Image: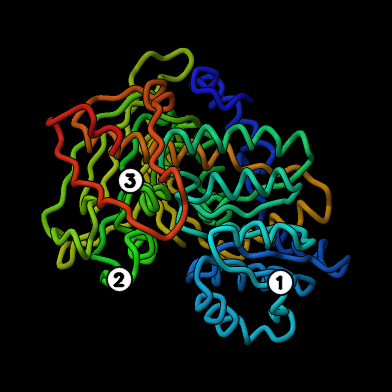
Amino acid sequence: MSAHAGDINRRDFVKATAATMVGAGVLGAFSPNARAAHRVAARGRREIRVGVIGCGGRGTGAAGNAIEASPDARIVALGDLFPERITRAQAGLSSFGDRAQVPPAQCFTGFDAYQGVLSVPCDYVILATPPGFRPIHFSAAIAAGRNAFVEKPVAVDPTGIRTMLAAAAEVDAKNLRVAAGTQRRHEWSYLEAMKQVRQGAIGRVVAARVFWNMGTLWSVAPDPARSDVENQVRNWLYHTWLSGDHIVEQHVHNIDIANWAMGTHPVRCVAVGGRQVRTDINEFGHIFDHFAVDFEYPPVEGDDSPRFALSMARQQDGTAGRVEEVIYGSKGVLRLSPGSARITGETDWMFKGPNNNPYVQEHIDLQNAIVNGTPLNETAQVAASTMCAIMGRMAAYSGSELTWDDALAHPMNLMPPSLQFGPLQQAPVAMPGKSASQLSS
């Protein structure tokens, strides 16, 4: 697949994502007992060596999940921009004993730390830096012949998505395996619920409402002794070139479920958003604190009726919290949240467990694919959901209605031309309707 914008259209994405779903086995679902047996089958065969690129909270957590997935897994390399995060990760993983003890020669820091990790022989690498770096690191990992666990989201702009898709084609050509950090795709309650949907329990899927409404998250105040780049990277949630804004960094989970239920991605969207609470640009950068997006999905074959999904994301203290996906069908409604799934309507069904830890399961599934030689490439799937979130942000920032093809082909590239500590102008807060240039913010 070419990285050129004009070579990637909706049909390509649908075909690639469908192939990914089938290869990963997510159109059906194992029973809990069968899944437990599937896990045991891969144990005891050989050591599973894991490198970690990005040693913050998520990277350290993913490293622990990788070790929990198999007694044969061990961490063999660590890489991060900042040395203290390497030290902190080692402390956080100390409970795993020698399976997480990494020699100093295999710990790497700086903007090129990923290259050091990739130089260490391993079975797969965990990519868990701020998302803006993901396309760079993923492309390098695939070029080096490494299997990968890629945290969501996988890009922050259309250029990054096209880079991910070009590398995704190489995954299959090189017989590699890739799992993504959209852990709901590996959670038994979600898998069993989607099996019910595929079997017609709610009829034709016609609409969805997906939510991630919560309070604020952490922030890191700027330090005048640090460069602009260092201050922004340390406070990466609040800078679009690093996080994609919270609709991309966090709400991608819920948008991914809408795509899963619909069996495809939307063809257009219109959105609103802004910042009412987090207005201090020094502490909270330039991102929004709320979004609402109306996604239009293509009709199903044999029925021209339009299909829609309402997406809502908010990070404002003191507001009502809601993290949920609601899927509407012609015969019923499915309500989903982590650990919970229920259908009401012509069919009355509820997931009764037992459930699993999806953060561990995604590593079990990847390790099984590597050890047993079974196909697994979730790149196109997570890239599609990430692109949906990016398109929603672009529509909200600009106030424009966007089509999928136009958004995916957009030349936007938010990555600074040179990655080094130094000056970097703070991006302005987007003002919808003021200028079409907001599409590049």
What is the x, y in percent for residue 364?
69, 61
Tell me the SS state at disc 3.
strand
* Lower sequence index among marks 1 and 3: 1
Q: Which mark is residue 220?
A: 2
Foreground of the two, 267 or 276: 276
Q: CA distance from mark 2 to mark 3?
A: 29 Å
At label 1, which amino acid type do we have? Gln
Label 1 neighbour load within 10 Å: few <14, some 14-19, many 20+: some
On screen, residue 27 above or below 283: above
Q: Which residue is mark 1?
A: 106
Find residue 210 and name its label.
3
Identified at 66% across, 55% down, the residue is 31
Point out residue 194 in the picture as x, y percentages from the top left corner. 52, 43
Q: Which circle's residue, 2 or 3, is located before the other in the chain?
A: 3
**Vertical relation: 242 (above or below) 110:** above
Q: Quadrant of residue 250?
A: bottom left
- Where in the figure is residue 347, as x and y percent of width and height? 44, 42
Left or right of 364 on screen, residue 401: left
**Residue 142 vs residue 311, the one in the foreground:** 142
Instruction: Inspect the image, locate mark 2, and give the three-letter code of the amino acid beneath it.
Output: Val
The amino acid type, in three-letter code, at marker 3 is: Val
**Residue drawn at the location 37% of the way across and 40% of the way down:** 389
